[in-house]
Image (cartoon, coloured by chain):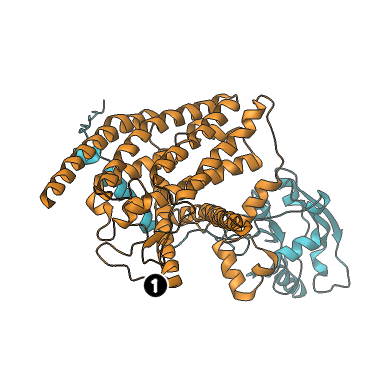
Amino acid sequence: MAKTKVLERKPLTFSEKTYIPQVASGLAATFVNMFKKSVTLEYPEVRPVIPENYRGVPTLVKDPKGRVKCVSCQLCEFVCPPKAIRIMPSEIDGEESDRAHVEKEPAAFDINMLRCIYCGLCQEVCPEEAIFLQDTFSLSGYTREEMVFGKDKLLKLGGTLPDNHFKWDKKKQAEENSENHH
Amino acid sequence: MSFLDYLIPVFYALAMVGVFMTLCAYSVLAERKVCSLIQRRVGPNRAKIPIVGHIPIIGKILTRLGLFHPAADGLKFLFKEEITPQHVRIGYYYLAPLIALAPALTTMVVLPFGRYIDVSGMVQPIALANIDVGILFILAVSSLGVYGIVLAGWASNSKYPFLGAIRSTAQMISYELAMGLSILPVFLWAASPGSDYGLSLFGVVQSQQGLWLIIWQPISALIFLIAIFAETNRLPFDMAESETDLVGGFHTEYGAFKFGLFFVAEYAHIIMGSALFVLLFLGGWHFLPGVADPWPDGLIGILCSISWFMLKIFFMIFFFIWMRWSMPRFRYDQVMHLGWKILLPLAVANFVFYIFLIAFIDNLNY
């Protein structure tokens, strides 16, 4: 058993009983505090620094060549715990030659921000690195409909993120060189 | 007497009430600002009055200093819905805030706040009424303020206000004694045998032309200061409110403008307490201890003495606020212990000591 050490409580000295030195030291402490810099962040004007890998609002991103990266595989839709994501897949326009071989893109991509729990599973599961939880942390709207974010809004929020792979470009190249690209 | 002779005192009185109420409003702001500084926040800095607040640089500075907040606070209290709980005793419930505020405003009548030199070359105080027994008047009337609190506690007909009122009464009785005893030596000191000042506040101030009384009588000053803190219900003797255990204490059942009156009364008491302490111990409008007043003659001298007095009052108000945000509250029984067992005997001993000292000094002179 651990030994308990009984601390001796000394009776108050005379100066402590008068309270005066204690009050004076308290006043000194608060007085010094008055000249320190305020720690308040005046929120709406000044925004906090958002750390990297912050899980804010989920967004859709484009690659540096301005193409939508999502291929509507619907993995995020399936993994989403609160079922906030709804995707309507469609085929890619044949005329969009740069991307025609990707086969699918979302016709509609809705995230219901009233349901989203910001868990980040969609980002984790996405094989195309197309959905990211970024640094927007404060959302508001007047109606429930307004809080269901459509594809355009998500793309606008997401912007463009750097891409190290250009996976589909490589696949296209491989195909053109008639290698086995699968 | 002509009509004008009646009108001028009324005008003076109204002007004084105006200045006093403005001071009250701005001490609320000072309270919030000093609190925020001590807690390293920025404090109120948003309220803005349309035209003045939009003057390019000045408007921004005024807004940041929060100078428009007292107006916003006042308007808020005025326009809020007046809610009267069903269980209160109606008449007394409405009467209580008025009784709390009236004594605080009445005491300022005898408060000398500056000096002028009349035609015969005598120094005269500037006050609404320069009466011989000024301190007696202030002590008598300012103690009536507790009736407002007691009445509020009783009329609210609810347990927390009631407890707050009981505490406040007990506290008031225990500190009134020590306070009275602590300022007796001051008047013994100030009014030499044969002087015609007696209990007048002006006499006390005039006796401090050399050294201030806080230097001659530090113990009296300390007891008086502590008692003033208790009288004004400020922390560390915040018995009447006791937010932590009594919700809001005596004003728990009050809202809107009635609460506003209590609020103003509290700050009016603080200003009166500060003024009294400055008059009795910090030399009133006299410049510095041991230094002759450098005030010039005429109107400028009058204004100088008034502003110097105001400056000291501002310091004391700051001290009150500073103290509030540094100290925790005493427990109820500790307050009683301090009042009855420490301050009262100390005040008596102090009184006796100065009786002998003054008698000794007087004998030396003859």
Disc tally is: 1
Q: Can residue A182 be seen in this view?
A: no
The tint chain A carries is cyan
Q: What chain is tagged by disc 1?
A: B
* Residue B117 in which image quadrant: bottom left
* Residue B300 in which image quadrant: bottom left
The residue at the far front in this view is B1
Q: Position of residue B265 (x, y in %)?
A: 53, 44
Disc 1 residue type (three-letter): Asp
Front one among A42 and B99: B99
Q: Where is residue B319 in the image (x, y as percent from the top left)?
A: 39, 52
Residue, disc 1 = B297
Q: Is residue A91 left or right of residue A176?
A: right
Eyeballing the image, is B29 above or below A167?
above
Q: Residue at x 34, y 33 (%)?
A: B177
Q: Where is residue B173 in the image (x, y as percent from the top left)?
A: 39, 30
Q: Which residue is drawn at 83% across and 69% down?
A: A100
Q: Residue at x 33, y 65 (%)?
A: B287
Front one among B40 and A79: B40
Eyeballing the image, is B229 above or below A165?
above
Q: Is residue B19 visible?
A: yes
Q: In which quarter of the image is the N terminus of chain A?
A: top left
Q: Position of residue B266 (x, y in %)?
A: 51, 44
Q: Tag 1, which secondary structure?
A: loop
Front one among B350 and A146: B350
Q: Is residue B240 left or right of residue A177?
A: left
The tint chain B carries is orange
